[in-house]
Amino acid sequence: MPWNIESDRPVYLQIVEHIMNDIFSGRIKTGEQLKSVRDLATEAAVNPNTMQKALQELERIGLVYSRRTSGRYVTEDAELVKKLKEEKTLEQLKIFLERMENIGISKQDLIRILESK
């Protein structure tokens, strides 16, 4: 998936979201080794320090862990991945529902629309 870094939010947070989305979608598998900081930074066209900060945040969350001398890996904890994916889903749904309410579409209207498709 291409890296679409925008100027409206901190770059490292966008990187965190990008990698999380790759994990949630299965593009990066649990237990899989990540590319090096330098390779990821080059791929995303960002400073390696920014990429390092993003990876540290992913480690703090628990999605990524480091092995001395062999790099970083995605957690093998499928339950954690599932929980974080559900939290992200709920967060996005809340944003979507607020936007729909702002244009006058209720939850019931959305259900009706979705059921008619």
Image: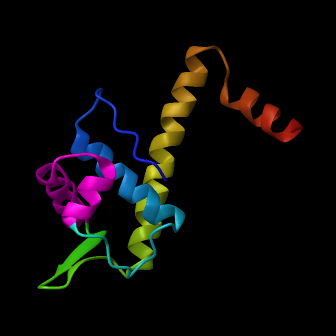
Can you say which quadrant of the picture contains the C terminus? top right
Magenta segment's dominant SS is: helix
Using the image, determine if residue 114 lies above or below residue 99: below
Say above or below: 37 vs 104. Answer: below
Q: Residue 63 colored magenta?
A: no
Q: Quadrant of residue 70?
A: bottom left
Q: Which residue is at a point 54% across and 40% down the rendered structure image?
A: 93
Q: Is residue 21 left or right of residue 38?
A: right
Residue that appears at 72% across and 31% down: 110
Label count reads 0
Indicate how the structure is coloured in the image: rainbow
Residue lying at the far top in this picture: please name it: 103
Judge left or right: residue 45 versus residue 86.
left
Residue 68 percent across, percent down from the top left: 11, 85
Residue 113 x/y as whole percent: 80, 32
Nearest to the observer: residue 48 or residue 95:
48
Q: Give the range drawn in magenta.
A: 37-61
As rendered, which of 63 and 99 lies closer to the eye? Answer: 63
Residue at the spot 37% in from the left edge and 58% down from the top edge: 19
In percent of width and height, residue 85 lies at 46, 59
x, y percent for residue 90: 49, 47
Query: In the image, what residue occupies the spot 12% across and 85% down?
Result: 69
Confirm whether the magenta stretch covers residue 43: yes
Q: In this view, does 24 lie to the left or right of 111?
A: left
